Amino acid sequence: MPIRLQEVLDHPMFSIADPVIRAAAGTAAWTQLRWIHSSEILDIAPLLDGGELLLTGGEGLAHASEERQITYIHQLAERGVAALAIETGVALPALPSAMVAAAEAAGLPLIELRKVVPFVGIMQAINSTLVSESVSQLRRADEASHAMAVELAHGGSLDRILAVLAGITRCEVTLASLSGATLASATAGNGEDDETAGQDHARLIHIDVPVRGISAAQLMLRVPANEDENLARTAGKRSVDILALAMLQRMSPGLREVAGAALIRAIDSGSQPWRLQQLASAAGIPASDALVAVVVRSDTSQQLRASVEQMLARAANSHATYVDNAELLAVASVGRDAPAENRQKLLTGLLELPALARTLAAVGPLVAGVSDAPWSLSEAKLTLELAASRGWSRPDADGAHHPVIDAEVFAVERLAVQSLDPYQRRNFVRQQLGALLDHDAQRNSRLLDTLATWMDCGCNTASAARELHLERQSMHQRLRRIFELCGGDPRDTGRLAALHLATRLARLA
C-alpha cells in the first residue's frame, strides 16, 4: 500500500519535530511519498525525481531573497516533489509568508518543523519502510514492462500497448507528441464509482520518451488519489524503451524532426556552413531564408518545448528545436519578405506566451541564412549573460517581469564586451562620467540611472519622467545637476553619443 504524507507526520519519530502543515493542508491525507530526502541546497530540484518529502534546516532559505524563496517553491512543485518540511528556529524564526502563499498556490504541502530533530533518524526510520514498498513496485513495474513487450511482439497498436500499462497502474495513460498532439491513450477500465473517488485529487506524472537519443514524445499518467503513484512512476519509466521501439516501428519520427535536432546541435557547436546547409534542407528549413535563434533558460525546458514549438509553428515559416540540459534552443525561419517585421511578430509571440513567465529567454539578431545561424545563437546566449549581470527585470506595460529579451536591445553591450577589454571599458566610463559617478557614490544618489533612462528615451524628458515615476519638475532639476557634472547639455556639444555609450557600459559594470 502507498505510504501517505499524513502517516509519516503521525510517525513517532517525525512527531518529535512538532510538525504543522502551513500550506496545502487538505492534500496531506492523499499525498503519496516515494522517499524522504534532506538537503540545504536551494538548487536541489533538478536532482530530485518526484515523490520525495524534502527536509531542510532552512539556513539557506533564511539568507535567500524573497524572489529566490518563491522560485525554490515553484521548482520543487514543478519537479513533482511530494512535500517540503522546513525547520524553524534561530536562523529562520518563521516560514516566510511569500513561501507559504506560493506553496498554497502550487498545491505543494509545506510543513513547519517547530522542534529540532535529527533528519537522519527520520530517514532511517521511514525510508526502510519505503524501500520495502519500492521492491514490490519494481516487481510489478517489471511485470508491466514484460507484458508490454509481449504486446509489441504480437503486433499490438500503441493504444493496446498503453492499455497494458494502464491496466497494471490503474491510471489514465496518454502518449503525446512534443507539439501536444495525442499519439495514443488508454484507461484502466475502472468502474465509474472508483474513478470518481480518485479523480478529485488525481496527480499527473510526465515522463520523456526519447527515440535515438532525441526526445520525441511525452508519456503522461493521470494517477487517481486512491491508486499507487509510485508504481505508476516506476512502471512508466520502465516502459520508455518499449514505447520508443513501438514508435519506431509504428510511426517512426520523421526525418525532419531528427534532422532539426541535429541542426541545432551543429549550430551550437559552430559546424561548417556546408554541414548546416545540408541539415537545414533535411529539416525543412530553406538554407537561404532569414533566420533568428532563440534561447530559453529554465529548469523545465523540456516541459516548455511543446508550448514554444506551437508558438513557432504560428509565427515562423519553419523551425527546429532542441533541449540541452536547462536550455531550450531554437532556430526559426522568418522568410525572405519583410524578415524584420516577421522577427518582431515572433518576438511578440514569445512575449505573450504564458509558459515563459518565470524563465529568461533571448531572441538573437536576424541573419541572412543558416550559415550565419551560429552567430545569432551565440549572440542570444551572450544577451542572456549580459541581462543576468544587470539583474534584468525590465517591466512591461503592466509593470510585470519581462522574460523575453531582444538581443538588439543589448547591441551596444554585445559589441563592447567583445571589442573592448574591461580596463578599456572602465577607463572610458571614468573619462566621460567621472564627476557623476563620484556624486552618486558620495550622496548615495542615482543620477547615473536618471541620465541612462533619459538617453534611452531619446532625450525625451517627459517620457523619462514617466519611466522613473518622477514629476516633470523633479526630472528637470535632476537633469540640471547632471548637466553641471557632465560639462553642459550634451545635446549642444556633440558628446551625446559618447555619454550614452558610457552609461550603457557603466551599467555593465
Image (spheres, helix red, strand yellow):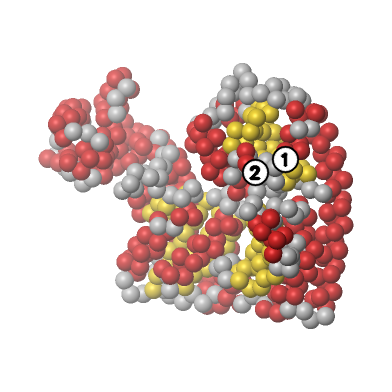
Labelled disc at residue 423: none
Q: Quadrant location of residue 439?
A: top left
Position in image of residue 42 (x %, y %): 61, 36
Mark-to-mark CA distance, 2 and 1: 9 Å
Quick one: which residue is furthest to the left in this view?
492
Q: Is residue 303 left or right of residue 420?
A: right
Kindly check if marks 2 and 1 are in contact, taking CB atoms under 8 A apart as contact: yes
Q: Which is nearer the N-term, disc 2 or disc 1?
A: 1
Quick one: which residue is furthest to the bottom in this view?
155
For disc 2, the neighbor class at 10 Å (few under 14, some 14 to 19, many from 20) is some
Question: How many discs mark residues in the rendered view?
Answer: 2
Q: Amino acid at mark 2?
A: Thr
Please name the residue shown 73% across and 78% down the image. Answer: 157
**Res. 196 in view:** yes
- Residue receiving disc 1: 5
Q: Amino acid at mark 1?
A: Leu
Indicate the secondary structure of the residue bearing disc 2: helix
Please name the residue shown 21% across and 38% down the image. Answer: 465
Q: Quadrant location of residue 367?
A: bottom left
Q: Is residue 198 left or right of residue 124?
A: left
Please name the residue shown 58% across and 52% down the image. Answer: 300
- In the depicted view, which residue is nearer to us: 434 or 213? 213
- In the depicted view, which residue is nearer to us: 400 or 468? 400
- Residue receiving disc 2: 27
Position in image of residue 94 (x %, y %): 57, 24
User: In the picture, which quadrant includes the C terminus?
Assistant: top left
Position in image of residue 212 (x %, y %): 70, 69
Position in image of residue 453 (x %, y %): 27, 40
Please name the residue shown 43% across and 39% down the image. Answer: 391
Indicate the secondary structure of the residue bearing disc 1: helix
Quick one: which residue is furthest to the front in this view?
193
- In the depicted view, which residue is nearer to us: 464 or 110? 110
